[in-house]
Image: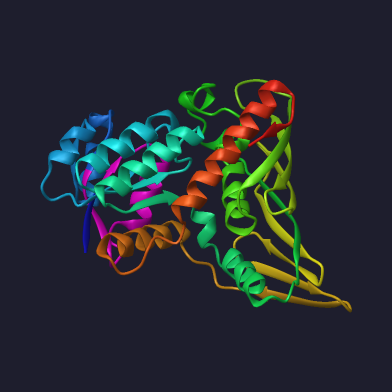
Amino acid sequence: MINAAIVGLGWWGKSIADAVQGKSQKLRFVHGVTQELDATREYAQAKGFKLSGTLEAALADPAVQAVVLATPHSLHCRQVIQVAAAGKAVFCEKPLSLTRADAEHAVAACKKAGVPLGVGQNKRFWPSMAGLRRVIASGALGRIMHVEGHYSNEHSSKFFAPWRDLPNETPGAGMTGTGIHILDAFANIAGPAEQITAQFISRREGADPRDTVSVLFKFANGISGFLGAVRASPLYFRVHVFGDEGSVEALGETQTVIRLKGGKTEVQDFPKIDSVLAEIDAFADAVAGVAPYPITTDEMINTIASLEAVIRSIAAGATIRL
């Protein structure tokens, strides 16, 4: 059992703790860090971990073997480097950083310290996406030519916090909330992007975001792609991969649709899993030396490189070459 600290106990930090504590057979939280100590004491007591106000306190705790970061985006790179320097494994919620340079610094720090790095891309663990990867690996689609992805949800309205509205924390509209999951899928399926062109349209009325992002991709291997994200729209998730012999589509968490030449269509439905628990368990396996974390550091860097390019393309209104 890996003893870990969780840093950041806002909406998502508590979601991670709720998914893991008392449910994982591989990792448990023994220490929590929050700036809202008084408001969080009862929660920490119920979950059975001690509470402190600084990352330094968690790193100084001899019981802590690993650290899970659920903090504002701009803090991630510095905190990953700090945790790695303390010799502890680190799991960082998405996005790993907001620039490629910072992602590379974070990866290099963990490599230098010899500690595992995990990143919070729980959609990678959805059964629908596992099914999609199996079909691609089988070769049934022939040559992969094009990828599409869309992820929208209502979290910007339901779980809106002031820090999430700061340009330096959530650049690129819905990209750090939903689009980043599609970028992770693209990095895994199509590899590094070569050229990105993004469009941003805002229809904001009141406090909550109302906007859309549309992105065209050309990948280094010649595959083309398209991404869409709408903030404040009902939940919708789709990743679709097209080859010259067929296509495979992940719809939501549990359905994969395979379409092959000749009109053959197969729909695969899978049982739902707790994907947050699955990614933390995978991180625990990496800490224990059982298996590498299933998202490679190259994929982590390529995802952030694409994120940065989307942000730059929106700001410049131009195509960005990576």
Q: Can residue 47 be seen?
A: yes
Task: Give the mark count.
Answer: 0
Q: Which percent across, then down, holds residue 192?
A: 61, 48
Query: Outermost residue, right direction?
Result: 262
**Which residue is drawn at the image coordinates 32% and 65% (left, top)?**
285
Q: Is residue 255 magenta?
A: no
Q: In which quarter of the image is residue 70?
A: top left
Looking at the image, residue 28 sits to the left or right of residue 108; the answer is left
Q: In this view, does 170 lie above or below 94?
A: above
Please give the name of the residue rendered at 43% of the width and 28% of the height, measured from the top-left corner.
74
Q: Can you give x and y, in whole percent of width and height, for residue 256 in the image? A: 67, 69
Q: Which of the image's four quarters has the C terminus? A: top right
Q: Where is residue 172 in the image (x, y as percent from the top left)?
A: 61, 30
| In-front residue for pair 83/51 | 83
Q: Is residue 57 left or right of residue 43?
A: left
Residue 126: quarter of image = bottom right
Bounds of the magenta segment: 5-31
Q: Nearer the viewer, residue 218 or 235?
A: 218
- At x 65%, y 36%, the residue is 232
Residue 23 in sight in this render: no
Q: Where is residue 121 in the image (x, y as percent from the top left)?
A: 49, 51
Q: Residue at x 26, y 36 (%)?
A: 82
Q: How is this picture coloured?
A: rainbow
